[in-house]
Image (spheres, rainbow, N blue to C red):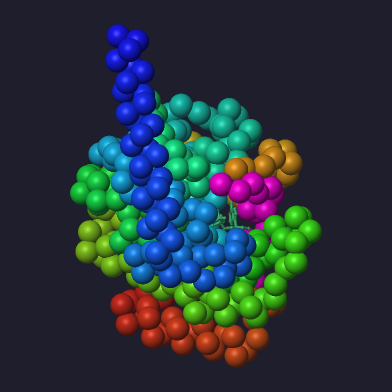
Amino acid sequence: MAHLQLCSQSAIAVTEEHDRKEIDELIASLPQRKGSVRPFQCLYQNFWFPIFVLPNVITFQRHFEAKHKDIVLASQPKSGTTWLKALVFSVVNRSRFGISDTPLLTSNPHDLVPFFEFQLYGSKLRPNLDGLGEPRLFATHIPYPSLPECIKRSDCRIIYICRNPLDTVVSSWHFFLQKAQLEEQPGWSLEEHFETYCQGTISFGPFWDHMMGYWKVSLEWPSKVLFLKYEDLKEDTIVHLKRVAEFVGLPFTEEEEEAGGIEEIAKMCSLKTLKDLEVNKSGKVALTIEFENRSFFRKGEVGDWVNHLTPSMVDRLNSIIQEKMSPFGLEFKTC
Ligand SMILES: Nc1ncnc2c1ncn2[C@@H]1O[C@H](COP(=O)(O)OS(=O)(=O)O)[C@@H](OP(=O)(O)O)[C@H]1O
């Protein structure tokens, strides 16, 4: 018996070693370019991925097994991912935890709803996810076309959040600049960052193809993808919390509504509440590389771009939106 176990373990090790080599060879053959945080981005399946994340993405594509009840939160970086994680975690787990004992009080949302590509499949690991309670909650920045087929074919649901590109480019510049400053590395200008964003070579870009991928599926298959906008959530969190709860098959009851249960979740997940928690002031989260928890909470405003972008930058981004997204009905509130 022990001999058999050893044999199967070494067979797995050989297969993993083989996979690793094959993935490394595949990545070496891809077009690469210098990126902002890490030295290189690779063009894989028509999107630019940070090179250090790509092995995890490929391992995830090959080995993830979806379950029908899974819920996947998808976004581009700096679109409201952290907020969406807190909201959906609270909705899905509200029968287990109240506001006084929610794990959000002691854990950053990224530790409660892990990313496939940064956390679960980090370091080319193949995690065992069978033991997780259902529904399992996952997150990803991977574009729709590159999601594993099992996610598309199963009944599992996807909630996508997007944000107007003017605020997103400003938010992502601040995020990486702060990271560089903390590590005493040279930063880079907003102009340089903006150029990368508009060229579509930012991580997980082009941003328009990322948004359009999920947008089109949400129109064709609304029970598969719920498409949310950061600006709408800011305007009326309650309405969109109800949509989320219905979409995941756990609608709020009249009693919950009357008892103020939805408002409680909205308040718990607000930027102010999360930002002021000790865990988010001092902790760190490992997303392949380490980030300070506080770096995920900045201003959280709609329209902060007015303080940073020049009129010509605004014109350029607006014309990309007009050309690539407006014809398909995707519009943004920018103030
Ligand atoms: N709870 C809550 N409510 C409203 N807004 C929030 C919240 N949490 C984070 N934020 C703001 O979202 C921006 C960070 O984006 P992401 O969470 O997508 O970042 S990441 O992709 O997970 O790295 C970043 O936006 P900016 O302030 O404009 O930079 C955060 O401040």
The residue at 42%/59% (across/down) is 27
Q: Can residue 334 be seen here?
A: no
Question: Depth check: 6 or 133 in front?
Answer: 6
Where residue 107 appears, as percent x and y from the top left, is 60, 36
x and y, in percent, of residue 22 in the image = 36, 50
Magenta stretch? 287-304
Residue 10 appearing in the image: yes
Q: Is residue 293 above or below residue 325?
A: above
Residue 299 on the magenta span: yes
Report x, y in % for residue 151: 28, 48
Quadrant placement of the N terminus? top left
Query: Residue 154, percent across and down?
Result: 22, 45
Q: In this rendered view, identify the residue nearer to me: 125 or 96.
A: 125
Q: Quadrant of ligand 1?
A: bottom right
Front residue of 159/11: it is 11
Q: Is residue 43 left or right of residue 62?
A: right
Seen at 41% across and 34% down, the residue is 127
Question: Quadrant of the rendered structure where residue 252 is?
Answer: top left
Answer with the quarter of the image where residue 220 lies.
bottom left
